[in-house]
Amino acid sequence: MANADTHQSAFLSIPGELRNKIYRILFIYSKPTSSGRRRGNIRHSGQLIRTCKQVYNESLSILYGERTFGVTISNIHGPHVGGLLIDKVLDDVMFNTRHCKEFRQKHRQAVLPHIRRLHIDIEYTYAHRLRTIRHDVRNIVHRLQQDDIRPLDFLELNCKLDYEDQCNANYRTEEWDSYITDIDGDETECCAMLRTWFGSLRNVKEVVINGLPDKDAEILRRRLQTRTKDEEGSVLPEAPEMALAAMYAALEKHAEGIPACAEDLEKALSAAEGDQVEDFRTRKNAIQESLKKHWEAINSDKKLWKF
């Protein structure tokens, strides 16, 4: 025990600037860290950060703030992520399986706000529905929009169409739609979906987008880098179409699962992802009217039961 304390105090006696350099050598990699890529020195990094509270506090911002975390979303071989995959990534880096669930959850909440850099691969095929990708993208965005998480310093999006779909697209003819019947999406739909949901993030300092058409990539980049406040802290106005994602999410929260709203809710989603502000407002009003009738009917039934 005394020997361990001696080594610990010797490390802490090193100037802080040098300790930070050591942390960066141990924690920062040229490639993104993901749960699918296990490296032996990741475990050693976890051992160091658990040395003592001072080392933990000093290295936390470097470990999570300067390392790039990688996430893959796909509808080709089933979903790769049901959120941010933060549980598995952080378990690889910092924890071992002997720790209880409550312990791991507590520390995930502590380190998640420190994550500043993300690399996200979106792998998709038109032969399967894009709903899986939409669900996972929305989960990631929702996690990053929590109040205790600061805007990202770096976000890289790599969109990869399945190779077979690429080959088919190269040989597309006027008769394409007549003999291809199992296609559930297209490039326009996918681009609109990614542009809408990733585009609801704000204040990202550096953005890299690969695999999207130039026009969609530029719109998405502009939205991601849009500032929400000026230098004095006042809220800046934004274009109506940039608020459609948040408006749809609020609408869905109240209307999802109610049969009378299902059709209009689906059309509202299409309008939101198509930047169709007026159409979205029309669907929103229709849903609100359906909700009003729905709850009036429920309240009426409750009154009948009282008698």
Image: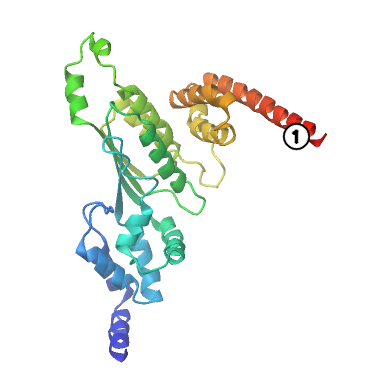
The picture places residue 5, in percent across and down from the top left corner, at: 32, 86
Secondary structure of the residue carrying numbered label 1: helix
Up-down relation of residue 8 to residue 217 (above or below): below
Q: Residue furthest bottom?
A: 2
Q: Residue at x 38, y 71 (%)?
A: 56
Q: Is residue 86 above or below residue 248?
A: below
Residue that numbered label 1 is attached to: 302
Report whether 77 appears left or right of 249.
Answer: left
Viewer-closest of 238 and 36:
36
Residue type of the residue flagged with mark 1: Lys
Q: Position of residue 181 (x, y in %)?
A: 29, 17
Image check: 197 left or right of 286?
Answer: left
Tell me which corner region of the image, top left, top right, bottom left or bottom right, holds residue 186: top left
Query: Is 43 left, or right, of 218 in this rendering?
Result: left
Q: Nearer the viewer, residue 81 or 28?
A: 81
Residue appearing at x 21%, y 54% in the figure: 30
User: Residue 215, position in %: x, y?
Assistant: 32, 25
Circle 1 packing at 10 Å, graded few (<14), some (14-19), many (20+), is few
Seen at 18% across and 30% down, the residue is: 163
